[in-house]
Image: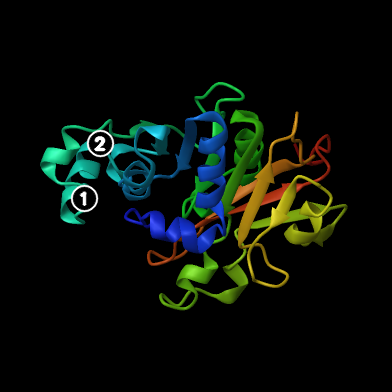
């Protein structure tokens, strides 16, 4: 997981995301934003620098080794986002620790925005996370998510192209393209420019988001080869089906 991506990458990946934040601030005064897989918190610091106390930034990581409050302070000074003196005068973003494949530790209807730049490829249950994003979003809330990591690494570490896709959906013995399956949901939009592959995804809040899928298994590529990264999540539409040998 790249831990030091800044607000400039949010601009690159998620189209007019910052403009949406500005408009929401103009209409309601203050917004609450979740950075899913925040790493060192560099992007969150960028939001604080850009919008001051008009944004409440909260991020999560799986563990402290992925990024902590102390690391965030060091990186802020190192990257000249804030000086030590400036850091002492601002409210730093919060970082909490959780497993993003399970229920997120936030109330429903809590965030105005959610974004995730480079962490979903490491989640065991990606579909559950997308459903959780919808749950924690407020009415008219928006999530913008980098749901694939293949555009960022490709063959830099000899990663086989057949493993680029980090998830599969199967229906009655046939594989369905992820991008085609998501087209059934009017609140979801592929905002990437990757043809028939998902790259960046937008979710607009709906009352309840249920993809109708069951996680069959997840495969950690790092167990296949030490230089590979990412977890493939395999789903079925047949949620009630039980394997006959069990």
Residue 112, placed above or below residue 78? above
Pointer 2 local density, CA inside 10 Å: few below 14, some 14–19, many at least 20: some
What is the number of the mark on residue 88?
none
Q: Secondary structure at mark 1?
A: helix
Residue placed most toward the observer, 108 or 234: 108
| Residue plotted at (47% across, 30% down) | 30
Specify which label sits upstream in the sequence, 1 or 2: 2
Residue 136 picture quarter: top right
Looking at the rendered image, the quarter that the C terminus falls into is top right
Q: Is residue 1 visible?
A: no
Residue placed most toward the observer, 4 or 232: 4
The image position of residue 150, as x and y in percent, is 53, 68
The image position of residue 104, as x and y in percent, is 53, 29
Residue 147, placed above or below residue 131? below
| Residue plotted at (57% across, 28% down) | 103
Q: How is the image coloured?
A: rainbow
Q: Secondary structure at mark 2?
A: helix
Residue placed most toward the observer, 109 or 240: 109
The image position of residue 26, as x and y in percent, is 53, 37
Residue 148 picture quarter: bottom right
Q: Which residue is mark 1?
A: 75
Q: Is residue 93 visible?
A: yes
| Residue plotted at (52% across, 43% down) | 21
Q: Decide if residue 87 is on the left or right side of residue 94.
A: left
What is the number of the mark on residue 69?
2
Which residue appears farthest toward the front when viewing the image? 26
Q: Decide if residue 35 is on the left or right side of residue 110.
A: left
Whether pointer 1 and pointer 2 mark residues with C-beta atoms closer than 8 Å, the reply is no
Residue 129, placed above or below residue 223? above
| Residue plotted at (34% across, 38% down) | 52
Pointer 1 local density, CA inside 10 Å: few below 14, some 14–19, many at least 20: some
């Amino acid at each position: 997981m790249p831990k030091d991506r800044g607000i400039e990458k949010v601009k690159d990946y998620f189209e007019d995301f910052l403009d949406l934040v500005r408009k929401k601030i103009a209409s309601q005064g203050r917004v609450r934003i979740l950075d899913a897989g925040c790493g060192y918190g560099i992007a969150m610091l960028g939001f604080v620098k850009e919008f001051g106390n008009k944004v409440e930034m909260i991020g999560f990581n799986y563990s402290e080794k992925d990024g902590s409050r102390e690391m965030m302070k060091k990186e802020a000074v190192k990257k000249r986002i804030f000086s030590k003196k400036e850091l002492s005068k601002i409210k730093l973003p919060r970082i909490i620790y959780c497993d993003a494949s399970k229920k997120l530790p936030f109330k429903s209807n809590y965030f105005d925005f959610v974004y995730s730049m480079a962490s979903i490829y490491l989640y065991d249950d990606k579909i559950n996370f997308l459903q959780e994003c919808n749950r924690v979003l407020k009415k008219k809330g928006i999530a913008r998510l980098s749901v694939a990591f293949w555009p960022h690494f490709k063959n830099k570490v000899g990663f086989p192209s057949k493993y680029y896709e980090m998830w599969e959906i199967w229906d009655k013995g046939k594989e369905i393209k992820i991008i085609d399956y998501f087209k059934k949901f009017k609140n979801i939009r592929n905002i990437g420019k990757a043809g028939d592959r998902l790259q960046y995804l937008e979710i607009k809040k709906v009352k309840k988001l249920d993809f109708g899928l069951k996680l069959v298994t997840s495969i950690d590529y790092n167990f296949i080869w030490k230089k590979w990264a990412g977890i493939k999540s395999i789903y079925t539409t047949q949620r009630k089906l039980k394997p006959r040998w069990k």
